[in-house]
Image (cartoon, rainbow, N blue to C red):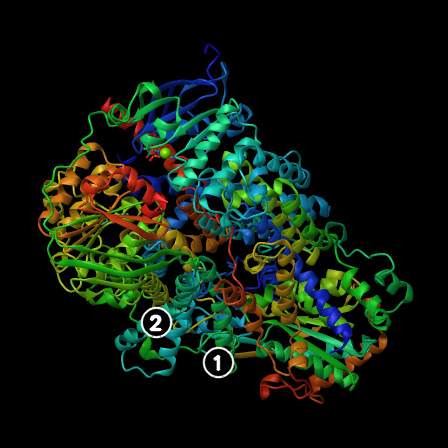
Amino acid sequence: MEKMPKWADVVLIPLISLILAAAISALVILGIGEDPIEAVKLMVQGALGSSNGWGYTLYYATNFMFTGLAVAVAFHASLFNIGGEGQAMLGGLGVALVCLFIPWPHWSIALIAASGAAALFGAAWALIPAYLQVRRGSHVVITTIMFNFIAFSLLNYVLVNQLRPPRAMDPASAKFPEATHLPSLHDILGTVGIEFSKHAPANISLLIAIAACVGVWALIWRTRFGFELRAFGKSESGARYAGISPFKITIVTMLISGGLAGMMAINNVMGESERLVLNAVEGAGFIGIAVSLMGRNHPFGVFLAAILFGFLYQGGAELALWTNIPRELIVVIQALVILFTGALDNMVRMPLERIFLALNTKKEG
Amino acid sequence: MTSAPAIELKGISKAFGPVQANKDISISVQPGTIHGIIGENGAGKSTLMSILYGFYKADAGEIYIKGQKAHITDSQAAIAAGIGMVFQHFKLVENFTVLENIVLGAEDGALLRPSLRKARKELRHLADEYELNVDPDTLIENLSVGHQQRVEILKALYRKADILILDEPTGVLTPAEADQLFRILDRLREEGKTIILITHKLREIMDTTDTVSVMRRGQMTATVKTAETDPEQLAELMVGRKVLLQVEKAPAQPAQTILEVENLSVTDDKGVERLKNVSLNIRAGEILGIAGVAGNGQSELMEVLGGMISGQGTVRLNGDALDLTGKHSDGRSRRARGIAHVPEDRQSEGLIMDFHAWENVAFGYHHDAKYQKNALFMDNAALRADTQAKMDKFDVRPPLPWLAAKNFSGGNQQKIVVAREIERNPDLLLIGQPTRGVDIGAIEFIHKQIIELRDQGKAILLVSVELDEIMSLSDRIAVMFDGEIMGERLPQDTNAQELGLLMAGVTASEGAA
Amino acid sequence: DLGGKFDKSFNEAAFNGASRWAEETGGKFFEIELQSEAQREQALRRFAEAGANPVITTGFAFATPVEAVAGDYPDTKFVNIDGWLPEVPSNVQLVGFQEHEGSYLVGMMAAMASKSGTVGFIGGMDIPLIRHFGCGYAQGAKAVNPDITVITNMTGTTPAAWNDPVKGSELTKAQISQGADVVYAAAGGTGVGVLQTAADENILSIGVDSNQNHLHSGKVLTSMMKRVDVAVYNAMKDGEALETGGFTILGLAEEGVGVAMDEHNAALITDEMKAAVEEARAKIISGDLTVEAYYTNDSCPVHKF
Amino acid sequence: MAFLDLIQLFDTTIRLATPLLLACLAGLYSERAGIFDIGLEGKMLAAAFFSAAIAYSMGSVWMGLLAGIGISLALSAIHGLASITFRGNQLISGLAITMLAGGMTVLVAQSWFAQGGRTPSLTDDSRFTGIELPFAIGPSEAEAAGRPLSQLIAEAGPLQQIYSELISGHSILVYIAFALVPLTWWVLYATRFGLRLRAVGENPASVDTAGVSVVGLRYAAVMICGVLCGIAGAYLATALQAGFVKDMTAGRGYIALAALIFAKWRPWYALSATLLFGLFQALELRPDMIENVTGVAVQAQLLGALPYILTVVILAGFVGKAIPPRAGGQPYVKER
Ligand SMILES: Nc1ncnc2c1ncn2[C@@H]1O[C@H](COP(=O)(O)OP(=O)(O)OP(=O)(O)O)[C@@H](O)[C@H]1O
Ligand SMILES: Nc1ncnc2c1ncn2[C@@H]1O[C@H](COP(=O)(O)OP(=O)(O)OP(=O)(O)O)[C@@H](O)[C@H]1O
Ligand SMILES: [Mg+2]
Ligand SMILES: [Mg+2]
């Protein structure tokens, strides 16, 4: 007998967790002497009240879709990839190399090449932890944490010593050439006659991210590999019985996961800053964890959660702009969401299960 | 005897979520006796004992120890009341020494050294008194299972237990080790200690206990004096109706050899040789049964043939050698060659418990062409239709392909696995513990399916710890002990006693000598 | 910039300049402190759209975003302090300081105050700008004492180097152990740790950007003031009349840089020092003395970084 | 390289290794009891902020230390609630706590002190200063002699140099941290509590059936972890530095975690591992030394990444194998 109906698991629990996180965040805002209702109004206004706000919200959401999918894919194989941050950094490096050193005739070709490079670099960065887990028994959680730090040092080295243009101060690469600049949502929607803010950074990567959501869904629930991946994630001994190779699943899954995280770079590096800056990723790798948890590891859930977090991000930026609430408020909200949906899941689940059990027995009795 | 019972349980109930593991159970056990508890898998025996030991909290009911109402809220209280328990799965810290395991939780003070010194002395004393010798400074992980069990018993005695609960103590022991255990238990009984013994083996009940209780589906169905009952009656009480010990089947008509195994060996990752130069063959249309105490290499044999582990030696299927170590030594390659495999542990191997039934029906065969829509995607609709058909044919209840595997009962789970494997129409079926934890109706059904497959001219390798099952299904019986085949017998030419000796590693010649 | 508004140094100076303008004129200014890269452009646009004029940015990392945004708001004037762009848009003003000149003066003072013949320099992020500081400092020190040893260390290569007092403190200790008895911190928030440790270990330190003499009264020899506050104040005062489309260079002559003399360091400054500094200052302004800029050919004539 | 240089390098190493050591031992207690903790960083950070904030506002460093320990304990309690009581994912919980601390410290610091997420600088009473051991050459001798301390030490004999420079002159917390190593060893291997703690990390069911509370033991371990992280954080903000700045732990919690793996969850090894990683950090500050000795300039970035790289190498089992406590990371479930 199911302890709880599916909808409660998929909708009710995340919703309650989110409400708890929001309630505590509201207390925090009150605690620092601001008005939470005003804050929410400002956030909604800033993030969703204009096409410019939407442009930023969707820009952030694009990042989070990629990193959220990265975490979700790995989760299905029971792998916890905390390395999205490092993988996305490396993805950025791949994009920068492709955009800086190869003269592209048109953005579309550049985009294909850059996506490939981003995915390749991100995947390569996930490959080593994956290999070490299957062959040497070191847990990916710890190794991917370590690889985040190593990635930062590596990127720092490359930017400072190789890619920084002369005279520049920033640890950042030169601007990418014009031909690699991606069309923004303004340009895309313009072709179908929809007005959209010209300056918002949301760009064509959003469509790629949405395609990635669909692709990941099909991969996980429609392909043989997805079948094996999920089976492996649920039961390793079962996978061994069925002749599913743990080596193959772990390696390929982490490659896909790292590749998705790396792909984020086409949005933030190629689409937005149009150059590689040191802290381009800005924690999106970690937010991917929250997004994936919130979205119950389902691509559609990830899509929704990414937009929610995009909203939080943009709304939070607006708050920081117009009030005394620092941007760190978003970090707090994000932490609370991870805490409630990820670590304290049972706190919400156990009482709910009891309620449903009681309801069921009553119905039966 | 008119003294107060050593243990008295009144109206104990316990539910795990939706599962009612114990329902209103009452028993009483006299001091200085051995009390047996039998029952099918999942009947609630372990749960009941864990409640007595304070490991689980009962939802309702009362416990009296020596006539006094006891409030056993945790194991500490049970230990204080003089109860000791040896769990089905030992509760030892593997990388601690014997001594450390024994003092754990029974230290005398905040500092360790005095406790250890005292325990060492006490241990020597106990060893002499009960023939319970173990080196106090060995790490548990370096001890044999039998010795680990001794440590568990020593733990209880060190805590001055005079009520000792043993949960399926012989499942993992060789017959010799088991005999020694029963000698120790006798000794303890003579000392006036009360013993509760849980087992599946009727022989042990008949040989050692004074009284016996039977449990079925969470309830206590009867408590009788051992002297006043017999195995048939107990078996009937256990399963709730007369057991059909004999399976109806026509004589085998073996044809060409399907499987040839020559000098097959398996070494585990700790370097222990689990399977030693095993040779056997199975012909089309016959069932080879492997008898043996759990842990003597049968699992490894199944796993190496099923492609779950690698091995050395030669295995030929229909005359062609199988890859035992390389790229094609996995389960998928085996299936492609026509070997189907019902694993011993359906919950952790045969099924993905969180998958829908329809996904489980493809499990292992998900590469089959008939389940593919195109080069990229699987054809889930075809799969669901296929599942529906199998469920109807094998009478899986409820016949809902959408239900997750974990939501089926054990017997129906097993039917799903068996349906999947048998319907594949394999040349060779490996089937391990086909009826473990399965209710009697399903047992009969599954047995019938196995015989039918044989009669279609397939080769079947059957592994089971249930001797009865082996004897009634097999056309030939091989007995394994310590990774070796001790001998082969025909069911009509042998009996349980002879097989039992072989299972204990005693060959006929030795037996005679 | 990312060092934080209250780094007691660079960013704080900018804030003070703005506050002074606000106090004096009753004008209003928006401010934001950034923690995020993508936010740079966003903030610029929001300010421009909100009608802020001029929009003032501090820190070289803003140069590129300013360039990107400026074209879209031709009616808004943008100021960036410390930045460098190959081409300056017509509504952007880049403000640069002759940090090497001020550093030269404090270098002289350091050399005169040093008993051990070793002085130290602790930079923040290792970028040409900071080497530019260090180079002026070394030239000043060597001008007073050609045999002097100048030890230089950079805190790091990332923006985090502006905000790492722990490292600043440890670097100071390392320099002290190498004999330095005056250290010059050109490291934003990291300098707080440098000055603290210097005071703890009883040696002299030199502050940067703002007047930091008061932080450890009597232990800070002086501060190389980079009048970011003045630049901000002036830009705000000029408002719409602000001249744009080029570089503004503020040196000793413009009082854009200088040394801080106040009651907190009065006891440390000898008349001889005062006289020497005054003399050098006059010479630099008059052009009789040129302090080599690190930028000239990305190296320092008297010191190897 | 001169002897004194080496001493000074080690002196720096000790100062920088101290927070790593404290955090590493904190993690050791928790992980030995089977609770993985990747939230060391967050607890340290929160403790750093609160110790500095309270030390500043109350003018007493000891109150600051208590406050630091207090907040770290509170975060530990959340971790305990998530991973022990509600049997959640310990990794996720640790991660969330680190993020929470990262956000909250700045948020609170900004609304409290309005200095851009930092606390004001601490003055003498509100911070830990160096303790001058008897017979050591310290600031008081320097004052008396009217000469810089560094000169006095440079002139002293090698033993006195070791004593005065390396051993003397650290803050009390440094000595506490080093004393905690033998203490931890003793607790772990010579006491009843230690036996149970180790057992609960290996096989909680064995502890449970022995009649000892698994939950109680694990909470105790998590709380000890909280106390030690609290001290580590307070050390950063009130001893190593005079005040809190945003993100001042700068990944030290993760380095401590790496050190813990490197140390195979053992106290004395933890000391060596943290000293080694402390040495890397010290060398990062003195690139000249490496250059003097090896003749090649080592990239600062490489030095910064070395602890992580080494940990990966160790984890990969190329140099000895690190086997974590067997029940580590898994919630103890006895009833489903
Ligand atoms: N939002 C969600 N979160 C988590 N799991 C989900 C979610 N939606 C569906 N699932 C699970 O994903 C699996 C397949 O979902 P999928 O979306 O493919 O189903 P469907 O499209 O409704 O069914 P069909 O395969 O018949 O088209 C199922 O195990 C389902 O329980
Ligand atoms: N910890 C637990 N959580 C949830 N359900 C449990 C737990 N332990 C046992 N059960 C369920 O309670 C029922 C009784 O289990 P129990 O272990 O007492 O049976 P048993 O008679 O000892 O069986 P076996 O012979 O297999 O040992 C079973 O359905 C089992 O699945
Ligand atoms: Mg049992
Ligand atoms: Mg010292």
Question: Could you say which disc has been placed on residue A120 in the image?
Answer: 2
Q: Residues within 10 Å of mark 1 (few under 14, many from 20)?
A: some
Tell me the kind of residue under disc 2.
Leu
Q: Quadrant of residue B15?
A: top left
**B408 relative position to C26: left or right:** left
Residue C112: give x, y in percent of width and height: 81, 78
Tag in front: 1 or 2 = 2
Tell me the kind of residue under disc 1.
Gln
Residue A289 visible to an observer of this rendering: yes
Q: Vertical placement of D99 versus B312: above or below?
A: above
Q: Nearer the viewer, residue D173 or D272?
A: D272
User: Looking at the image, which residue is at 85% across and 61% down?
Assistant: D136
Q: Are marks 1 and 2 in contact (CB under 8 Å)?
A: no
The alpha-carbon separation of the residues under discs 1 and 2 comes to 21 Å
User: Looking at the image, which residue is at 56% across and 66% down?
Assistant: D307
The residue pinned by badge 1 equals A162
Q: Residues within 10 Å of mark 2 (few under 14, many from 20)?
A: many
Outermost residue to the top: B2
Residue B50: give x, y in percent of width and height: 43, 29
Q: Nearer the viewer, residue B315 or D298?
A: B315
Q: Quadrant of residue D178?
A: bottom right
Judged from the image, the secondary structure of the residue bearing numbered disc 1 is helix
